[in-house]
Image: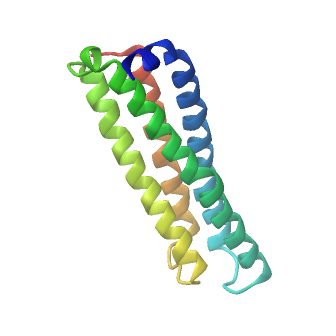
Amino acid sequence: MDEFLTAHFEWIRALHIISVMAWMAGMLYLPRLFVYHADVPKGSEMSETFKIMERRLLKIIINPAMIAAWVFGLLMLYSNWAVYKSEGWMHTKLLLVFLLSGVHGVLAKRVKVFARDENEKSARYFRILNEVPTIMMIIIVILAVVEPF
């Protein structure tokens, strides 16, 4: 397995980057849908349309992309464990990716809350929530590219 990972490392890295891009696209778009959904009447035609959009975005794009990002990321980590195990930037990056996965869980829960017409949060709440994955993404990219410590 080690030889396979080493021989195909660049492909694994490319697939990891593609997966992360898809995951982040969904993580940035879903809270924006919530902003608009929070302002429409419950049970309205527009609310029902948002429910479909949110569910499909989560199930077809965000969830598979997150799983793929984790799989390819862990394969890269495994193949270079000797290098990464003592790198502080990698530990910080992994912590932030765990936290980002938690934000993913929060968003998934909100999809279910909206689906039941039980949302009590304001559009402002979702505007603020929309910034969390953005900030985390910026820090993670800086850590991965600059390797500051």
Q: Residue furthest bottom?
A: 43
Depth check, front residue: 12 or 37? 12
Q: Work out whether residue 139 can be spotted.
A: no
In the rendering, at what x and y percent does residue 47 appear? Answer: 71, 77
Q: Residue furthest right?
A: 45
Depth check, front residue: 129 or 54? 54
Q: Work out whether residue 23 can be spotted.
A: yes
Q: Quadrant of the N terminus?
A: top left
Depth check, front residue: 71 or 114? 71
Q: Is residue 102 above or below residue 96?
A: below
Residue at screen point 38% across, 54% down:
102
In the rendering, at what x and y percent does residue 59 appear? Answer: 61, 60
Residue at screen point 57% across, 20% down:
11
Place residue 81 in its image quadrant: top left
Total of numbered circles in the picture?
Answer: 0
Q: Quadrant of the C terminus?
A: top left
Residue at screen point 52% across, 41% down:
68
Is 148 placed left or right of 58 in the picture? left
In the rendering, at what x and y percent does residue 22 appear? Answer: 62, 41
